[in-house]
Image: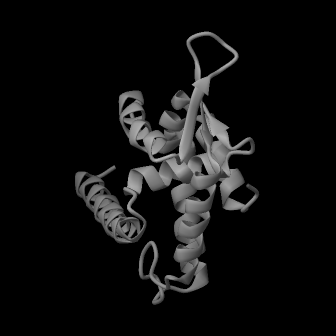
Amino acid sequence: MDLLIKQNLLLTIRALYFCVEEQWAILGKRHQISPAQQHILFLLYSSNKKSLAPSELSDLGCWHISTVSRLLKPMELRGLIKISQDKRPKYKEVNLTPTGIQLIQELINSVGKMDSFPLNISHLTNHEIEHFLECSQKILDVNKSENFGNWYKQVKTGSY
């Protein structure tokens, strides 16, 4: 791949990420929750059992495990999640609490009412958006874990 194409790809992905992050931060201010914590709530909410191990959150959220640990502590203090021992020694399980479920549902409802969340794509056709998503899926398929791929396919269909 040509160096200029690599550079443009990197700049485009980074710029899109920061646009999304900005919108996410605006939403988070209304609910006193960071974008990363919103993502943890969504990961838990979209899991079939409404609970995940910190290592699963790390994989699905694309964070280092230490970042996950740092994010979970204030969420537990706020009553959004409960961290408990798993059946296996040395393993923990993170569960959504009723307060956490209520907040993620409020966030989802807020997103549904925002025309330009996560980005203003009103100038694109549905075909262009679908093509972008197809290309993105191909990139994710070779760069993320199988666990991530399975979760992503489940979330794409809205089956959570």
> Residue 13: percent from the left, percent from the top?
34, 60
**Left or right placement of residue 107 versus residue 86 in this view:** left
Q: What residue appears at the point 44 percent right and 38 percent down from the top-left corner? A: 72
Extreme residue in the top direction: 89
Extreme residue in the bottom direction: 123
> Residue 46: percent from the left, percent from the top?
66, 51
Q: What residue appears at the point 29 percent right and 55 percent down from the top-left corner? A: 10
**Up-down: is 145 above or below 32?**
above
Q: How many marks?
A: 0
**Up-down: is 29 above or below 52?**
below
Residue nearest the observer in this picture, 38 or 124: 38
Q: Which quadrant holds the C terminus?
A: bottom right
Residue nearest the observer in this picture, 108 or 101: 101
**Left or right placement of residue 95 versus residue 59 in this view:** right
Quadrant of the image occupied by residue 84 = top right
Residue nearest the observer in this picture, 78 or 88: 78
Q: What residue appears at the point 34 percent right and 71 percent down from the top-left corner? A: 26
> Residue 39: percent from the left, percent from the top?
48, 52
Quadrant of the image occupied by residue 53 = top right
Q: What residue appears at the point 54 percent right and 51 percent down from the top-left corner? A: 41
**Left or right placement of residue 48 versus residue 34 in this view:** right
> Residue 96: percent from the left, percent from the top?
62, 45
